[in-house]
Structure formats: structure tokens, C-alpha cells
Image (tube, rainbow, N blue to C red):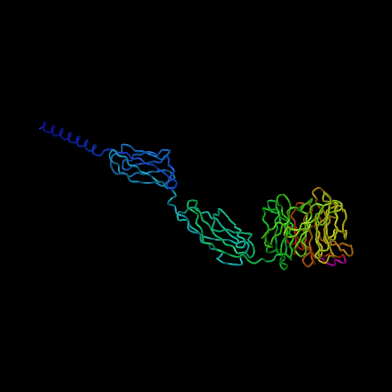
């Protein structure tokens, strides 16, 4: 029995071994090769991990994206590829004995399945709404199905001139747009971006701002960057408060000395341009800015004191260039020199009478002092001398509509300094007929100065600037009534504050 059992075991083992060898021979081995590339660019993907299932054998792609697996038993496999930043990819592969199967993997970015945000819905203001303020809050809504953070871009187009306001990187679903123009239709659109997918655009809607309130006050404020900016405003005579203030020029440009002309309905002003001072015009809402001067800029000692003048019909200007006075049409044509000082003194200020018959000039030496005020006719003949080579600062010329009165200011302290600081500047009303002057600054507080006087439209009041005589304090615009001027009695002229932190007023 033992011999029989031993023989059976030996035969069984022999058969098992022989069967196993025959099976391996029948299956055989093959090779899997391939390449890993980016789906969109077909650039090679290096160091991607390639694994076959069910054996879990693994290799990595080389610098050109290629890989090879040798001695793979014949059969059906699932080949996967993994690489950080890409979606995992699978491909089937059937390995045949002594043959090579090639597998190409096109890898999608890991965000390929990410969905874009919904198209923004414009909520406020309603489409086609009118009478909007110059500052409008725009509100919209949008969602991202993958809860990705969304940033928005706002585009607003002015229907009148196609000027485009483009605000980027908004993270909220609202934005307040300011400094819009009166009576203007605007189109607006929101563009959403999740930083993964292409931008998604909203529909386009429109709104219109309210009609221009026809502000009659114009003045200058100092911007935080040191530039001057021009504003317009109204004033509520009942409640004694400013209203409808509008910024007409941007803070990134230095603009000052606004002068409105009713006939042309334009505002003229000075602006720094290529390191020179030039004369510009604009509409009452700040649009359509036009550069008038070119060959001969405005020039003098203190550019903050220099002034120019319209002709009453709004067709021409006079302006100073050192010791010369020039005439130019508002379209920039017709430039001509019409006067030159006899003693070489600089012309700092000028004012042209309403009837165009005479011009008032304020001149000074190179230090800004030894000032004179006199009038000339259009031929350059001197008509009347108001001040002649006086000590101390002088300025602020304005001729009354009937040519009988002249406004100016004068520092009665006669103080002189290199920075042109004034200590006790008063406003005077000079009567050409009687050659007398009336002090309009009797209510001025000690330690302050009155500057830049201008007649009101009805010439019953004067608008001006008051500030501390320290030369650095904030400036405030006031108005004062003109009482009993002919009797030289103006002891109760009732100053009223109009606009704080403002200067260089014009009231038309």
C-alpha cells in the first residue's frame, strides 16, 4: 500500500508541474508602451504615474511623456495615469504574447469638470430707468455651482461719446459708480469670472442720469495728491446750505481758475499740460474738454494768481504771458499780441469789460510786488491808474457790467516775503467816476485775509475767499452784500459762508 500511495503522489505532482509549465507557455508576455500628453496642447507630461490593474505594476513617464512596461502577462488590463494637477485617466489595454500595445493618454486639467458661474442678473437700477443721481449703486446677482469665489468686472459706456468706465476685481455683487454726467444715458454690463472657466457676461441694461441743475457757482478744491480740481455747485438760500456739488475735472490733472461764460455756455480754466500752463474750455458738466492755447502758453510769476478773461460774447479770450497780453479765439485761432507793459513788469491778472472797450490789468515785478492796477483801451492806451507800484500784495480784478466799478484786493499791511504771504488783505470797490474806494472787508476777522473777489450776477453781492494769514490753512468761500457803496458806508455787509475748503470762486 505504501508503494502504491507513493507512486500516486509522484504521478500527481508530475502532472501538476507539467500542467503549470504548459499554462505559462500558452499565456506568454507582451509589452505596453505609450505617451502622456496634455489634452489641449499635446505637450508631454513628465513623471506621470502609470499603473496597470489588476497587477498594480507601476512606471513613470519620462521628460517627453513616454513610458514602457515590459514582460506583462498577456491579458486584459485597465491602465490608469495619475499626475497632480490633472484628472486621473483610464484606458483599456489587451496584452498579446510577444506583441506591443500602445496607449496614449490625453490629460485634462484637474479643473476640466469645473462649471462656470451663472450669467450675472442685473438687479438695480431697473433697465431704462431715468432721473438717476450722479452716483449710482449698481446691484447684480450670480452663483457658482462649484462654490468657487467669483470676481466681477463692470463696464459702463457713455452713450453720448462711447467713453468706457471699466472697473476690475470687484468681489461684491454691488458697486457705487460716481462722477457720472448729467442728462446722460449709460449702458452697463457685468462680467463674472471664477478664475477657472471663461468669463460669463450678463445682459446689457441702461439707465439715464437726471438733468443738469444748472449750477452757477464754480470753484477749486485741493485734491489729496496736491492737484487742483474744479467743482460746480448751487446754494440753498433758504436753508443756507450748498447743494448739487459736482466735480468737473479729475484729480489726476491739475486744473484751476474756472471762468463761466453765459453766451457760449462754456467754462474756461487753466490746466498744466506738458509742464506748461494752458487755457482750456469744457461744457458745464465737465465734458468736451478743448485745449485753446498752444504756441504761447500762459506764463508769469505765480501761476495760482494768474487770471485770464472772456469776451462778453464768448468768442475770444485775453491772457498774460509775462510782460505781454495776448488775444485768442476760443477755437485756438487768431492769436495776436495786443499789449506789452512799458516798464517790463509782468501782467498777472486781466479783466475785459462787458462792452469790450477796456481792459483792467494788474502788474508786478519779478518778485510779485511793486504792483500796479490800471485800465487800457483796446489800442493799449492807459485810461485810469488805480494803484501804482504799491508795496504789498494786490490782486482779484473784476470790472462791473457798466464799467463804473472795479473790484480788487490789497494787503494793507504792505508785508512782503519770498513766498508772497499776505497778512491783512482787504477787498476794495473802486469807483472810476469819483476815484474813491470802499472797503468791503470791515467784518473780516483779525488774522485772516480776503482774496479773489468776484461780482455776483446781479452785482449786489461779492463772492470771495477768506483764510488764515498763515498761508497754509484751509480756504473758505463767502459772499457779502454791497450796501451804500456810493456813500462809502458798508459797516453791515453780512458775510455768509458758502463753500468750505474751496477757493478761486466764480459766480455766473
Q: Give coordinates of residue 107: x percent, y percent.
A: 41, 46
Image quadrant in which you'd find residue 36: top left
Q: Residue at x 82, y 49 (%)?
A: 366
Q: Give coordinates of residue 416: x percent, y percent.
A: 84, 50
User: Is residue 69 one of those drawn in magenta?
Assistant: no
Image quadrant in which you'd find residue 19: top left
The reply, left or right, for residue 180 in relation to residue 79 is: right
How many numbered discs, if any?
A: 0
Q: Which residues are magenta?
A: 482-487
Viewport quadrant of the N terminus: top left
Viewport quadrant of the C terminus: bottom right
Residue 501 visible in image: no
Relative depth, front residue between 448 and 177: 177
Residue 344 visible in image: yes
User: Is residue 486 one of those drawn in magenta?
Assistant: yes
Residue at the extreme right of the image, as rendered: 434
Amino acid at each position: 500500500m505504501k508503494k502504491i500511495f507513493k507512486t500516486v503522489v509522484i504521478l500527481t505532482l508530475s502532472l501538476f508541474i507539467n500542467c503549470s509549465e504548459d499554462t505559462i507557455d500558452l499565456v506568454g508576455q507582451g509589452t505596453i508602451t505609450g505617451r502622456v500628453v496634455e489634452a489641449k496642447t499635446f505637450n508631454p507630461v513628465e513623471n506621470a504615474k502609470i499603473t496597470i490593474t489588476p497587477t498594480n505594476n507601476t512606471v513613470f513617464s519620462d521628460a517627453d511623456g513616454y513610458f514602457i512596461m515590459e514582460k506583462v502577462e498577456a491579458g486584459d488590463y485597465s491602465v490608469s495615469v495619475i499626475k497632480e494637477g490633472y484628472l486621473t485617466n483610464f484606458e483599456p489595454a489587451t496584452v498579446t504574447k510577444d506583441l506591443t500595445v500602445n496607449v496614449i493618454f490625453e490629460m485634462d486639467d484637474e479643473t476640466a469638470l469645473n462649471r462656470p458661474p451663472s450669467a450675472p442678473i442685473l438687479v438695480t437700477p431697473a433697465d431704462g430707468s431715468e432721473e438717476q443721481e450722479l452716483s449710482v449703486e449698481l446691484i447684480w446677482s450670480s452663483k457658482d455651482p462649484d462654490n468657487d469665489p467669483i470676481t466681477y468686472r463692470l463696464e459702463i459706456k457713455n452713450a453720448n461719446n462711447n467713453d468706457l468706465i471699466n472697473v476690475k476685481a470687484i468681489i461684491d455683487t454691488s458697486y457705487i459708480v460716481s462722477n457720472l454726467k448729467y442728462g446722460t444715458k449709460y449702458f452697463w454690463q457685468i462680467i463674472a469670472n471664477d478664475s477657472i472657466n471663461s468669463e460669463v457676461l450678463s445682459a446689457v441694461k441702461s439707465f439715464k442720469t437726471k438733468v443738469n441743475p444748472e449750477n452757477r457757482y464754480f470753484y477749486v478744491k485741493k485734491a489729496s495728491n496736491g492737484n487742483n480740481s474744479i467743482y460746480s455747485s448751487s446754494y440753498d438760500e433758504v436753508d443756507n446750505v450748498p447743494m448739487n456739488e459736482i466735480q468737473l475735472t479729475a484729480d489726476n490733472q491739475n486744473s484751476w481758475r474756472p471762468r463761466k461764460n453765459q453766451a457760449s455756455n462754456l467754462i474756461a480754466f487753466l490746466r498744466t499740460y506738458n509742464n506748461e500752463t494752458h487755457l482750456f474750455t469744457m461744457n458745464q458738466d465737465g465734458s468736451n474738454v478743448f485745449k485753446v492755447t498752444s504756441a504761447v502758453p500762459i506764463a508769469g510769476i505765480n501761476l495760482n494768481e494768474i487770471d485770464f478773461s472772456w469776451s462778453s460774447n464768448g468768442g475770444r479770450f485775453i491772457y498774460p504771458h509775462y510782460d505781454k497780453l495776448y488775444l485768442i479765439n476760443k477755437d485756438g485761432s487768431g492769436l495776436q499780441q495786443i499789449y506789452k507793459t512799458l516798464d517790463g513788469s509782468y501782467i498777472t491778472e486781466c479783466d475785459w469789460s462787458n462792452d469790450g472797450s477796456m481792459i483792467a490789468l494788474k502788474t508786478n515785478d519779478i518778485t510779485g510786488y511793486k504792483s500796479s492796477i490800471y485800465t487800457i483801451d483796446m489800442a493799449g492806451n492807459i485810461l485810469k491808474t488805480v494803484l501804482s507800484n504799491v508795496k504789498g500784495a494786490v490782486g482779484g480784478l473784476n470790472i462791473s457790467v457798466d464799467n463804473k466799478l472795479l473790484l480788487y484786493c490789497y494787503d494793507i499791511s504792505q508785508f512782503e516775503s519770498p513766498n508772497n504771504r499776505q497778512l491783512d488783505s482787504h477787498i476794495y470797490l473802486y469807483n472810476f467816476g469819483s476815484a474813491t474806494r470802499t472797503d468791503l472787508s470791515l467784518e473780516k476777522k483779525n488774522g485772516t485775509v480776503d482774496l479773489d473777489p468776484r461780482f455776483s450776477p446781479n452785482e449786489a453781492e461779492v463772492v470771495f475767499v477768506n483764510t488764515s494769514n498763515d498761508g497754509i490753512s484751509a480756504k473758505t468761500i463767502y459772499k457779502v452784500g454791497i450796501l451804500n457803496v456810493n456813500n462809502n458806508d458798508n459797516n453791515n455787509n453780512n458775510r455768509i459762508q458758502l463753500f468750505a475748503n474751496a477757493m478761486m470762486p466764480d459766480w455766473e
